[in-house]
Image: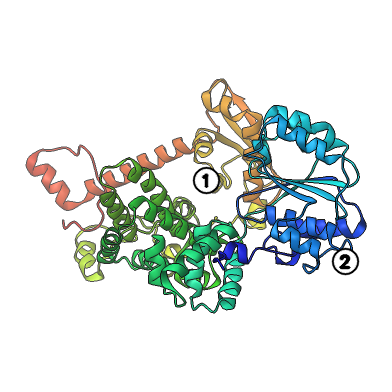
Amino acid sequence: MSYLVLARKWRPQTFRDLIGQEHVSQTLQNAIDSGRIAHAFLFTGARGVGKTSSARILAKALNCEQGTSTEPCNNCSACTEITAGTSVDVFEIDGASNTSVDDIRELRENVKYLPSRSRYKIFIIDEVHMLSTNAFNALLKTLEEPPPHVKFIFATTEPHKLPITILSRCQRFDFKRIPLPKIVARLRFIVDQEQVGISDGALAMIARKGDGSMRDSLSTLDQVLAFCGERVGDEDVVALLGVVDRRLLQETARSIFARDCRGVLDIVRQVDGYGYNMRHFGQELIDQFRTLVILKAVGDAAEFAELSAGELAELQELSGGVALGELQRHLTLLLRADTEIAQSSFPRLVLEMVLLKMANLAPVVPVDELLARLQVLEKPASGIVASGVPSWEAPRSRQAEAPAARTRPELPRSTKPPQLAEEADSPGLCAEPAPAPAAAQAKTSEAGGGDWEGFVAFVRGKKPLLAALLEHGRPLKVSAQAMELGYSAGSFQYNKLKDADVIADLTGLAQAYFRTATAVQLKPLSGSTEGLPPTLLEKKSLDQSAREQELRAVAVGHPLVAAALEIFDGVIESVKEGDGSEKV
């Protein structure tokens, strides 16, 4: 007896055997059970997902000698003949070979006669989209009003090529690609029945090669068994199918996260030694990092990734200590490298460089955190001035500052207690500035600055461009209930701010800052602005001028400076404030 391939030997014979198409089998069973059986069915979907098998099962369920039932008995002569393809009342027609109108005319003549032995005369036309236009036209009338003893079942992988007149006369069932875990489970059942030793990892590679098709997966399994016999090793499957070993992908990600440059270069050497295509390996790595991103984002990627449960568990462990933003940056680099590899004459070099860049990827600080830090530094509160020394600069010792303190006069400036300095640099205060307390809001000036500087600093953290416009305005009235700003009539800033959308944004920011409904009004100013509150830009300029005059007065009063001016007959041109490290 000739050998029967696994795809035919383990072909589904009942609706229960259909894998991944429960929506189709349940609908057909309900239709049979209720007697609402259509005269024409259209089965669409990718190759090897069970379209023709479902057509045969439906034909057996309708013509079974035990009676019309939701599951055929597969024991009577009608069922066995349909399974063997020898039934005189069930016609399986290849649409690719019978495309002419003459073939359809012969079918129409055959439709008139009653079935010889069975309950229904059933026509199964596979790849029906291959019929010619004339053949479709010849079939229309018969398909719309067939005799009660006739059923049509069409199967196709390209339903968009069928005329709409055919589609409207059929009940359409879309077959899905079979998920990888279900294919692996079916393959595990089959190899157990065949008494073959093979790991779940090898079955996952075979199922992944099938790309959602059960028939392709079984054909690949047949090829593997012919090569390996009854004991199949993972290395044999990798060598036979030429797929990228998942362990190599795992090791690549592990080396990248460990910043192991030598490790990633060694992996590229192995890829080249195994003969893998560099771009194919890069694409497999893209899919690997996509799964890592999904795992980090939603926690469970079983519905989004075609991986076995063991592989998902390994990736879950691998992504445990990596941030989501870092994984997304790695994925972006790989996507960019895929295009470069396709266009480059040195694909290995491109792959090495991108893996090295990923292994040395520096961590980034979120923009929100940077803006929050700037916001804390820029907002004056209770006379406390944030230190201008960068956080990465080590503080100088008190011993180094002592000589300077003894030799130069102390300039009047605000100081910050050490505990406040530590709190300002801590992450906990790098957030949105707290609004003024209710008591303080009640005491804000009705015709002055009030908490104007704090509000502008708050806006700068949210909308820097809007804050730049506010710096040119005069705070005529600032309180938690109302805010009136004055601008020169016809000025650029006034024209920009009077826009309804800008006023709405400004009102929302004021409400968020003062924690109450705040009315915002703009007032055009003309003529002299004497007696009006200064703008923030003018206030900064005045403060800077006052500080320069204060420094000049201190410098003139210093005995060493006075002596130098007398000796060299000089004048003070400018005064620069030092950082305290100079010795006088």
Which residue lies at the image location 42% right of the left edge and 48% below the top edge? 335
Q: Distance between the residues labelled 2 and 1?
A: 89 Å
The answer to whether the residue labelled 2 contacts the one labelled 1, judged by CB atoms less than 8 Å apart, is no
- Residue position for label 2: 66
Note whether 354 is above or below 180 in the view shown.
above
Label 1 sits on a secondary structure element that is: helix
Q: Which amino acid does label 1 sit on?
A: Glu
Label 2 sits on a secondary structure element that is: loop
- Residue position for label 1: 453
Where is residue 233, by image quadrant? bottom left
Q: Earlier in the sequence, mark 2 or mark 1?
A: 2
Task: Determine whether, in the image, residue 41 is placed left or right of residue 478.
Answer: right
Q: Where is residue 265 in the image (x, y as percent from the top left)?
A: 26, 61
Give the farthest residue toward the left.
567
Task: Determine whether, in the image, residue 343 is placed left or right of residue 474.
Answer: left
Where is residue 297, by image quadrant? bottom right
Which residue lies at the image location 24% right of the left edge and 65% below the top edge? 262
Q: Which quarter of the rendered picture does the C terminus lie within?
A: bottom left
Note whether 297 is above or below 571 in the view shown.
below
